[in-house]
Image (tube, helix red, strand yellow):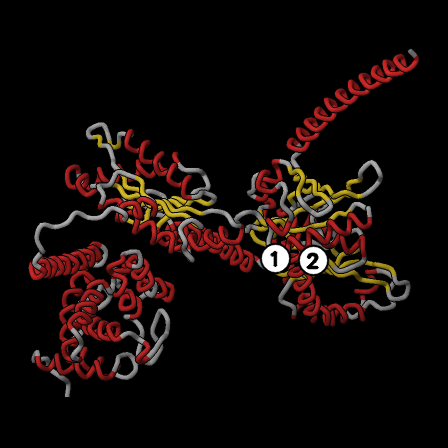
Amino acid sequence: MDEIKFLQARITELEKAEGRHKLSDELLRKTELQQKAILNNIPDIAWLKDKDSKFIAVNDAFGRACGFSPKEIIGKNDLDIWPPKLARKYRADDKEVMESGKRKCVEEQLADKEGKIQWLETIKTPIYNDKGEVIGTTGIARDITERKKYEERLREARSELEIRVKVRTAELSRANEELRKEIIGRRKLGEAFNKNKDFLANVFSSIQDGISVLDKEMNIVLVNPVMEKWYADKLPIIGKKCYEAYQYSPQPCKICPVRVTLKTMQSAVEIVPKRGLNGAIIGWFELYSFPMFDQQNKELIGVIEYVRDITSRKSAEERVGVLNNELLESNKRLKQLSLTDAHTGLYNHRYMEQVIEAEFHRAKRYAHPLSVIMIDIDYFKSINDVYGHQFGDLVLKQFARQLRLIMRKYDIIIRSGGEEFIVISPGIDIAQALNIGQRILSAINLYNFGNREHTVKLKLTLAAASYPEDRVSLGMGLVNLADQILTKAKESGGNRVYSILDIRKEKGKLPAKRSKPVDIRILQGKLDKLTKRSNQSLVEAIFAFAKTIELKDHYTGEHVEETVRYVTDIGNGLGLPKDEIELIKQGAALHDLGKIGVSEKILLKRSKLTKREFEEIKKHPQIGADILRPIQFLRNIIPLVFYHHERWDGSGYPSGIKGEEIPIGARIIAIADAYQALTSDRPYRKAYKKEKAIAILKKGAGSQFDPRITGIFLKILQAEKQVFPK
């Protein structure tokens, strides 16, 4: 019986203990939830790490600051997430805190997902278990990036001020020393100036800046002629307070170096307003104040004010500041324009070439997937043909807007040309990319594009390529693969989403056997005709493109065809292959295409260009090359457009290359372009006579032009019965 009672009592105790444990677990869960809520609602960045520096918990503010979600961070250590240099610094700080058991406050950098650096003020504290053992660290951090920037600007401003004070002090040291020598042994300011008045008058009259001598009550005791001239309307000013005479104020100035000198007995400097009648600001003074001492008693007896008029300098600095701001804004706008498609507002092909490799490198570094989705609007040319290009442009804008709504905010959407678009999606594998592609296809197929008068539905062909599933070694490799997949998808009928898996499936099917062999000669003949027609269309397209320059510069539009004729003759004279001559003709047709990006005021100016305007003109080869770069079939003529203003002796632009380094096509275009320019009317001068133009070409042989090409061109002109000077 005793044993039964004992067991019953033990069972009761265990049941009570189990109840207490359940209550403790419930309280613990509530505590954890409360702590998590507190952690996520504080504005500062917060995290917890274990003894191996692995993240146990982070708050939402931490995720927003670095661009990672908490799920991407928890369970990883610093070396898994941050650049190695920052990661090693973080781990060293954690180790120091755990070993010392003391809290540590540090200023450190944090790199976000894009590599952007911000500054944090972090308090790191050790975490203990119930036994008093350190089991990890906790960190609370605050963003101090703006404060660091302000401190840097403040240091720069202080350094500049110190330099200015030293320079001005050196300029005044001799005059100051002379004044000090004259007042040695004098107890009162009046006695100091009763003697040697002639010497002081000579010193004062020879200095072109203003000088005032004040007593300790800021009364004006003596001024030089410059100060009298500046304040002629207030004469006499001797005996008045300096702020009454100079600032038209009944109270001392808030910013006053004299007050600083009287208080500290040290030199001081400030920039103060120059005031006219009624206290209106009419300029600016740089005001220096120097203490004056009684040499016997070493007591301060007054202040010397040295005043320099900096109105012109201040105005110039303000103008420079305005110009700098305008330049920064202009550069910002130009950069934005150079990387975005003006019509849709999406990024352009140039931006894609910059960002794709960076995203690919980031994906490899952090072992994240990366996908490229290429989109082509099927039969878009028919929309332009039926409804006109203005309607087609409206549809493209609406399509770009819908694409933005469908994609994630950190996906990169690019209009790569015409009706073709590319989406770069970080963190997305091939399966997800295909799902997104299908979602785009379904959404666009349902949407009506157009205006009140006409509406159309669009069909799309999409191709997806992903790293690491599709084995590529470069970011552009993904783009090129997606392009190949897109071509296959369009050949299969379009309005679908394809990946490399779909291509492999199709390759697995054997093609149907032909009933009879195909005549190879017939196919070859058809191919030759298509090639000839394609080349003809290409030339026509190039000349049509060149004609658009006529809208801005009538001269440029007129002289292009003549330049093309001359380069053709020179190419034949040099015995160049026909395909190379054809390439040079195309380059000649587009050599001034970059003038589209130059202001009409400069192109049509009737007087000589200023240095700044000429620098703008010199940009047109680069602009032309940038326009042509995304157009695949025109890429071979880019060097001819870019280098046609280089000189044989290396003094040309934009790169300053010389001699045989300049492509032969660019050298041919250079001399043909120069002769045509010399013999044509320009806004700022009449055309030269042919004799004068030929003399200029001869003089430039070996300096501006290739001497061999010059000789051949002169023979061509002679054959055309041009008149040569004797």
Task: Name the spot of residue 139 as percent of width and height, x first.
Answer: 71, 42
Q: Is residue 84 left or right of residue 524?
A: right
Q: Residue at x 71, y 45 (%)?
A: 122
Within-10-Å neighbours for mark 2: few <14, some 14–19, many 20+: many
Which part of the image, by quadrant, shows the N terminus? top right
Spot occupied by residue 100 in the image (x, y as percentages of width and height):
82, 49
Asked if residue 95 is positioned above or below residue 180 in the image, the reply reads: above
Q: Decide if residue 303 is in sight here.
A: yes
Q: Amino acid at mark 2?
A: Val
Left or right for 542, reference 471:
left
Q: Is the residue marked by circle 1 packed among few (<14), some (14-19), or many (20+) residues within 10 Å?
A: some
| Residue type of the residue flagged with mark 1 | Trp
Alpha carbon separation for disc pair 1 and 2: 20 Å
> Looking at this rendering, what residue extends furthest in the right direction?
2
Q: Which residue is mark 2?
A: 269
Say which of marks 1 and 2 sits in front: 2
Q: Residue at x 68, y 42 (%)?
A: 141
**Which corner quadrant of the image does residue 632 belong to?**
bottom left
Tell me the residue that label 1 is attached to.
230
**581 to 542, vertically: above or below:** below
The quadrant holding residue 717 is bottom left
| Mark 2 secondary-structure assignment | strand
Asked if labels 2 and 1 touch by Cβ distance under 8 angstroms, the answer is no
Q: Secondary structure at mark 1?
A: helix
Q: Earlier in the sequence, mark 1 or mark 2?
A: 1
Can residue 150 be seen here? The reply is: no
Q: State the quadrant of the C terminus.
A: bottom left
Q: Which mark is residue 423?
A: none
Q: Residue furthest bottom?
A: 726
Q: Residue placed at 67% from the left, 30% from the top? A: 36
Q: Is residue 73 left or right of residue 254?
A: left
Looking at the image, residue 39 lies above or below residue 650: above
